[in-house]
Image (cartoon, rainbow, N blue to C red):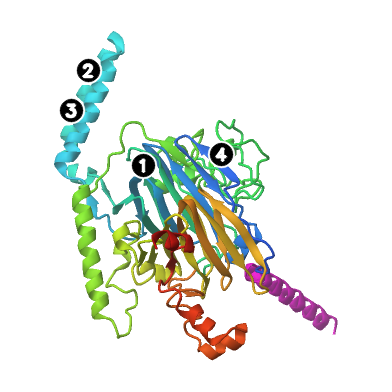
Amino acid sequence: MAKALVFSLCLLLVFNGCLAARQSQLSPQNQCQLNQLQAREPDNRIQAEAGQIETWNFNQEDFQCAGVAASRITIQRNGLHLPSYSNAPQLIYIVQGRGVLGAVFSGCPETFEESQQSSQQGRQQEQEQERQQQQQQGQQGRQQGQQEQQQEQEEQQQGQQQQFRQLDRHQKTRRIREGDVVAIPAGVAYWSYNDGDQELVAVNLFHVSSDHNQLDQNPRKFYLAGNPENEFNQQGQSQPRQQRQQPFGRPGQHQQPFGRPGQHQQPFGRPGQQEQQGNGNNVFSGFNTQLLAQALNVNDETARNLQGENDNRNQIIRVRGNLDFVQPPRGRQEREYEERQQEQLQQERQQQGGQPMVNGLEETFCSLRLKENIGNPERADIFSPRAGRISTLNSHNLPILRSLRLSAERGFFYRNGIYSPHWNVNAHSVVYVIRGNARVQVVNENGDAILDQEVQQGQLFIVPQNHGVIQQAGNQGFEYFAFKTEDNAFINTLAGRTSFLRALPDEVLANAYQISKEQARQLKYNRQETIALSSSQQRRAIE
């Protein structure tokens, strides 16, 4: 009897624990009882050697409701954002500049390969640079240089047969520029490099409530190089280095990185190795140095370099010289991109009326198209010469978004232009102000304006699903980018030719709003525009 009672109590405890964990996992969806919204600028900043990373506090109620987190990355000229991956799918919008992005899909072949001629030229350039440095070092340096030259000649003779294996090979790189939207699946590592003539600025959305994230609702970045700081510090302060002075970022109390125990056991290596292990904050730094060296077949010094020991540059580093890697000529890549776009449009037209394909295109995992540019005015889906334009991106345009359950919208409104009052039917909307300003109102189910604010450049605000919203551009115009938490998000409008009001009979409008039939007709037909509406002031000025 006693054993049965103990067993029952154990089952009860396990059940309660599972129920609590399940409720905790679903809690963000139950935190949408919002009484007030606010447009915010980032509240946490990490300064790196060649740029900065700013994040918004994901613990705010509106972020928890939408199940998202957001960051803004600024990469200076010749800056390299080190490789990392996240526990959540990411959607990236390039606000400014141009550069190169590489995404690493495990198991896929290295389709970009260096030619033998370029490899020889690269080695000759390196040798020439070494000779110039040696000539500046005096007589002893010159003697050492002669010995090194002899060694180099011997190594070249020995390595001629192995030259093919020494050529640089890597997976595909993609050119990015202002207006590009880039989709990064959860767990896929990527890096980016600014080879332009101005700062490269990008805004990232992390869809932490996605089914692809099987951890908790906290955004996590797993870096594979360097010694990065925690980008989503809940206290809003940068974390200092372990056992090291902090040349960048703000001082604050150190917290253990995710998943790392407070004390490291030492089953491998020599005594004292424990101090070296875990010095950095990247994934490699948690492994034992000797074990890592054996796994990679390298020496201990190289393994320590991978672990980011004594690296104070944070997650964006400055490249000395130029970053030289294999990539197609820019003109050729852009032409191929346009050809693929035309092929995709033709396929979509042929498939109209039929069942959609699994991913919209005959794409393999290794050749997934990750980006689309929606900044070009010619690409606009909605255009009004007196109000502005709107471009949308969904899983029909970029098939990978179907898996990520994300979509996007880019808007450009002229002075006093109005985005028709509407509600998002099946998605939350996370809006980033690119340029200009606008008055924004968001209304909940009780008819309360929970957001009534003039939003400015660099701010971000969230419009929860089904909440009414209206936006009017200010004197500077209004440019924005909106992340949507559904791959085929759509809206219902409250004004304009395709609005809710147009769809109702005159009698229904007259009785519902206590107006005459004539007023009901005026209410329905006064607006011939659809979504981008010109203001009454603009129309009076034109008339």
Q: Position of residue 455 (x, y in %)?
A: 55, 53
Q: Is residue 474 above or below residue 30?
A: above
Image quadrant of residue 159? top left
Q: How crowded is mark 4: few (under 14 residues within 10 Å), some or many (20 or more)?
A: many
Name the one closer to the observer, 266 or 447.
447
In three-dimensional space, the C-alpha distance between marks 2 and 4, rounded to whole angstroms, equals: 39 Å
Query: What residue type is disc 1 on?
Result: Asn
Of label 2 and label 3, which has the lower sequence position?
2
Q: Report the residue marked by disc 2.
A: 146
Q: Earlier in the sequence, mark 4 or mark 3?
A: 3
Quarter of the figure with the C terminus: bottom left
The image shows residue 361 at horizontal and vertical percentages of: 28, 72
The residue carrying mark 1 is 194
- Tell me the distance, in whole angstroms, between the alpha carbons under discs 1 and 4: 28 Å
Say which label, 3 or 1, has the lower sequence index: 3
Q: In this view, does 122 lie to the left or right of 87?
A: left
Question: On screen, 250 above or below 354?
Answer: above
The amino acid pointed to by label 3 is Gln
* Residue drawn at x 51%, y 81% as measured from the top left: 501
Q: Where is residue 206 in the image (x, y as percent from the top left)?
A: 51, 59
Q: Give the range drawn in magenta.
A: 1-30
Which residue matches tag 3? 153
Q: Circle 4 sits on which residue? A: 279
Classify mark 2: residues with Cα within 10 Å, few (<14), some (14-19) or many (20+). Answer: few
